[in-house]
Each structure stands twice: as C-alpha cells, then as structure tokens.
Amino acid sequence: MKKHIHIKRGIRWKLLSTLIGLIVGLLIIITVIQILVQKKFLERDLDNRITSIRTNIHTRGKTLSNYLARLTENAIESFKLTHITRMIKQLVADDEDLKYIILSDYSSRAYIHTLKPELEQEILSSDEDWFAVNQSNAIIHEFERDGISFLEFVVPINKSANPWGVLRLGYSLNMLNKEIADSREEIMFETRHIVVWSIVISTIFIWIAVATIFMISTRISSPLVNLTKSVWKLSDGDFSAMDTIKIKSSDEIGMLGNAFIEMSRNLRESHRKLEKYSRILEEKVEDRTLRLKVANTALKEKDNMKTEFLSTVSHELRTPLALVMGFAKIIKKRLDDVILPHTNINENKVRNATQQVKDNINIIMLEGKRLADLVNDLLDISKIEAGEVEWKMEPIQVSDIIDRAAIISSNYLQEKKIDLIKDLEDDLPSIIGDSDRMIQVVINLISNAMKFTKKGSITLRARNLNNEIVISIIDTGIGIAVQNQKKIFEKFKQVGDTITDKPQGTGLGLSICKQIVEHHGGRIWVESEWGKGSTFSFALPCNGASNDIIEKNEEPIVTETGVES
Amino acid sequence: MPKILIVDDEPGMRLLLEQSLEELEEGGVELFTSSNGDEAVEFIRNERPSLVLLDVMLPGKNGFEVCDEVKNKLGMKNVYVLMLTAKGQDFDKQRGLNVGVDSYMTKPFDPDDVVKKIVDVLRLEI
Ligand SMILES: Nc1ncnc2c1ncn2[C@@H]1O[C@H](COP(=O)(O)OP(=O)(O)O)[C@@H](O)[C@H]1O
Ligand SMILES: [Mg+2]
C-alpha cells in the first residue's frame, strides 16, 4: 500500500498567512498614522501661511492707505489732485493684488476711481463708510463680489481737521484663496504619495517575507515530510528507511530524526526477534498440527471403526442369536407338546434327565434374551455416543410421557402384584425433547424399580421446581448403598453380591438413561438407603419462558383441545 | 391353498422358520423356501404366494429390491411382504415403507410371534 503525502494546510501555509497578515496590518496602521500626522502638520503649515499672507496684506494695505491718506489730504488742501491721481493709477497698475482705489467725499462723489474711466457720483453705500468717517484709522472689512474675495481698507480723509470723505483701497484675496487651494492639493498629493509608498514598501516586505518563509518552511517541513515518509515505510515493515535518513541539523528536527532512527533501530531489533519467535512458533504449530492431524485421523478412523464394528458385530450377532433362541423355543415346544407326553417319567433317571433338559432349555432361553438385550443396549449406547442418533426434538407434555411409559410397563407389573401410582402436579409446563427417548428413560427406570422391588409400590412423580421438571421413579425395594449410588450410572456397573445375587440385566440401562437425559440438558441422580427403596430422579429444563408466554396467549385453544381430548 | 415363501440365505434361519411354521402346514398352508433374491422374484411371479418372509441381506437382489420388484414392477400388491431385519434401524423402516413392505420383525424374534402374525394376516383358523 502506497501512501501519498498530502498536507492540506502545512507549516508553510500557516507561517505565510500569519506573517503576511501581520505585515499588511502593520503597514496599514503605520500608513494611517503617517497620513494623519502629515495632514495635521501640513494643515498647520497652511494656516501659518494664510495668517502670514493676511498679515502681509494688512500691513501693506494699512501702510499704503495711511500714506495715501496723508498725500490725499495734502492734495485736497492744495487742490492739486492730478499728481496723486496719476500716482494712484500707477500703484494699482503695478500691484497685482491691489484691485482698486476710490476717493469719494461725503456727498458720495468720486474724485478718483481706478475701476471706471469716467468719474461719477459715487454714493457712499455701506455702513462701514459712514463708520469709517468718524474714525481716525483705517477700517478693514472683507466681502465677496462676483466670486472674488476682497479686503477693503477704508481710510477717513479730513480737510482742515474736518471729515471730508473716504479713501477706499480694495485688495483682492484671490491670491490667498489660490494659495489655500494649492496647499490642499498639495496635501492630497502628499497623502496619495504616502499611500503609494506604503503599498510599494508592503509589497516588497511581503515578497521578502514569502521568500524567507519559503526558505524556513522548506527547511522545517522537508525533513519532516521525509521523516513522515520514512515512518510510513517503517509502518509498512520497510526498515531500510532509517538508513536513508541523513541528519544535517542539530535543532529540534534533527533531534526528532535521531530519535526516529533510534526508535526504528529498536523496532527492527524487536521485529527481528519477533519474526524469529513467530517462525519458531509457526514451525512448532505446524509440527503439532501435523501430529494432531495424524492423531486425529487415526482417532477418527478408530472411532468410525468402533461404531462400524459395533453395528456390524451386533448385526452379525443377531442372526446366530435369533437361531439359538428360536431353536431353544422350538425344542421346548417339541419337548412339551410331543416328547414329554410320550416319555416314561416314572423311571427316576428319565424324570431327572427330563427335568434337567427342561431347566437347561429355560436357562438357554433366558440367557439368550439377556444376550439380545445386551446387543440392543450396546448398539444403542454406541449410537448415542457416536452421535448417530437422530433426535426428534419437539415440545412434549410430561404427563404424556409418563402415561405411555406406564402403559407399556404395566404388562409386566400385573404379574408381580406391585401397585403403580401416578403423582403428577397439575399444569406442568411442556419440555423440549425426543418423546420416544424420554419414554425409554422412564421405562428403563420403571423396569429397574420392578426388578429390585419384591412388594410394595412404584410411584411415578412429576414436579415443577424452579423452572425444572423433576420426574422421579420411587420404589420400595432393596435400595442402593450410598457408596454405590454414583457407580451404577457407569457402563456395565451392577451392584449386589455377584455370586449369589447377580442381578439380571446388562448394566447398560442407567448409562443409556444418563446419556439421553444429558443430551436434553438435564441431569439424573438417585436418592436411596440400603434396604429402604430408591428414588431415581431426572430433571429437565422447562420449555423456555418465551414458550410460557405463547402458551398463555393461546390459552383458549389449549383449553379447547383439553376439553376435546 | 395359501402359499408362504421363506427367503433367507442362512440355512439355519430357513430351517428355524420352516419348523416354526410347521404347525400351519396342518392347516393347509404350503411352505416354500428360497436362498436367493432373483430366484425369489421368479417364484413369486409364477406361484403368487400369499405371504413372503423376506430377509434383507440376500445374494442377488436384496430384500428391498425384491419387494420393490414384486410390489411396484410386477404390480402384485396383494402379496403380503413381512420383512425380517437384523438392523432395526430407522432408515430401514423408511426404505421399507418406500418400496411397499407391509410389516417387519427384528431378529432375534420369537417364533411364536411370527406364527401369530401370519395367522393374523392370512386370517387362518387353527
Ligand atoms: N431401583 C433400583 N433399586 C435397586 N438397585 C437398582 C435400582 N436400579 C438400578 N439398580 C442397580 O443399578 C445397577 C445398574 O442398573 P442398570 O444400569 O439399569 O443395569 P441393569 O438393570 O441391566 O442391571 C443394577 O444392576 C442395580 O444393581
Ligand atoms: Mg436396567
């Protein structure tokens, strides 16, 4: 599996974005501050200039107007206005700022007027004029006409210490306004200049930053990326990666690289060890598996052979057995029906021999029966143990099992005068099981009880104890000593005095019962005291709680069938 | 006159069955024996016995094959087939049912039971 290194937002990106952000922010702040400072400075400068220009005009105007007033007063005194008129006209022509000079008396007649070629009646229009007349110094006021600002100096003119009129000097303030406009433009220009410079500088800085960061981040990230590749290689089990790593720096990344090499070295070591161990283990496992397989096949073969052998043997045994038993029976018949009636039993020898033959035939028949039972039981138990039995598991009623077993057993019971008592609890829940096999268990236990009980009774009891059905077969027979109570469930184990009191049977009945009960998830045991009867019990789990619910739900149907049956 | 055919490859078994059924002969039943499946089929086709006592393991055709041949191929449904099986296993029963076996007895059997059974089936009066 090949892994590709794809880092969405690497170190480089992070450094770059942070630094560019910082630079741009800083430059914006610096630019704004610079612009603000510059502006204030320039504006103050402008104000100063305006004031100085004004002052200049004022001084010039005042001086000129006072000077002209003196000259005019003298001229009026001597009625020689020609000279001053020419001088004034020359003054206006020479001075760009001085737009006009008007001399008028109180009757509003203009004596000198630089704006108009012909002298006319000039009415003293403004209040200032009237106010100026009574003043000793010049009156200064500003006004605007036709878009042009004017600074007007109005100087009172006296004739022989009496007010005569006024001299008006009009200075244009356009110069000043132009100066202001120019200055404003200059400020704008200056600001723009600063902004442009800021942008240029920041661009330069950004490029420097990008270059630097590129270098730094490459320095940082490329060994990291290489290291990562190596780690991945390592994780794929390629230990060659650690040999290809070359550590150039002794910084943190260098340390990381060293640590990595150290780690992979250790890893390789343990990997090698592990590989060695696992190889050894594998070999061992393989070896064992092989041996086990061989043993297993042998065992299976043996097991198959055993089952096969048993069924063949039991099959092969049946035919001669059938013959022995069959002929014994026929011999007995012929003896009883034909030979004995024609025999002279009065003769002692003959009577004894006849009796012996009869007894022997009976023994042959009984033992034949035992042999047949043994073969059947053997076949049965070998089939159960080999798992060859087909279990027909289905819900079954306990009372059904007991009833059917009792009916089958009762044939033998009648001969023996033993009471068979049924003691079943009401409403026993059903169990899951193979009914034929369950019946087999009960019959087996009843036949044992019958075998070991001379008089009294056999009780079939069924109880529901803690969700377990406990079925007990209780007899009043000879009982079993405590030390034998476990043994009897083993194969071929019979108890009692084997010489005088050897019980009939095969010794396989209880083993078969145990196998069947355990296959149903139950257990079987005996409670007994020597001489006082035995109680053989087996417990089976109830058909699960969920089934109880189903049964309850279907209660009407159950009662109906109950009524029917 | 009802005929009964005994088919078994064991001479002892044939003898035992013959002797067991001896008393029936007095009631007019004819007994025949055969030791071989093919021979048995041949006999049944020609002689039409009322009842056949049939062993499973036979040379030639086995018991099931004989029964199948008689009941299904020859269509002789009213020949009563009583199978004598040594195994008494479940699959035998099923196989027997499939080919039309009427009933079966497991070895070892009580000769009296065989007689009783035959008397029942053939409704003989003894
Ligand atoms: N109800 C009983 N009372 C006394 N002893 C019993 C009873 N049931 C079983 N036993 C003892 O347990 C032995 C084993 O029984 P079982 O396995 O059924 O074999 P079998 O009945 O063929 O002898 C019997 O031989 C007998 O000694
Ligand atoms: Mg027993």
Image (cartoon, rainbow, N blue to C red):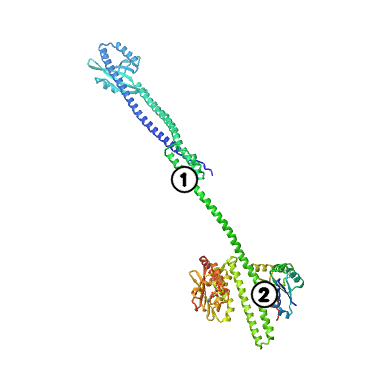
Compared to A216, does A350 lie above or below?
A: below
Q: Nearer the viewer, residue A305 or A434?
A: A305
Q: Is residue B73 left or right of residue A11?
A: right
> Residue A317 is drawn in which quadrant?
bottom right
Residue A189 point in image, percent of width and height: 39, 26
Which one is earlier in the sequence, the residue at label 1 or at label 2? Answer: 1
Residue A77 point in image, percent of width and height: 25, 12
> Residue A108 is drawn in which quadrant?
top left
Task: Compute the Cα span from label 1 to label 2.
Answer: 83 Å
Which part of the image, by quadrant, shows the N terminus of chain A?
Answer: top right
Q: Is residue B7 left or right of residue A419?
A: right
**Can you name the residue that lies furthest to the right here?**
B46
Q: Secondary structure at mark 1?
A: helix
Q: Nearer the viewer, residue A560 or A493?
A: A493
Q: Is residue A263 left or right of residue A513?
A: left
On the image, numbered disc 1 is attached to which residue?
A266
Q: Amino acid at mark 2?
A: Leu
On the image, numbered disc 2 is attached to which residue?
A323
Q: Is residue B71 left or right of residue A422?
A: right
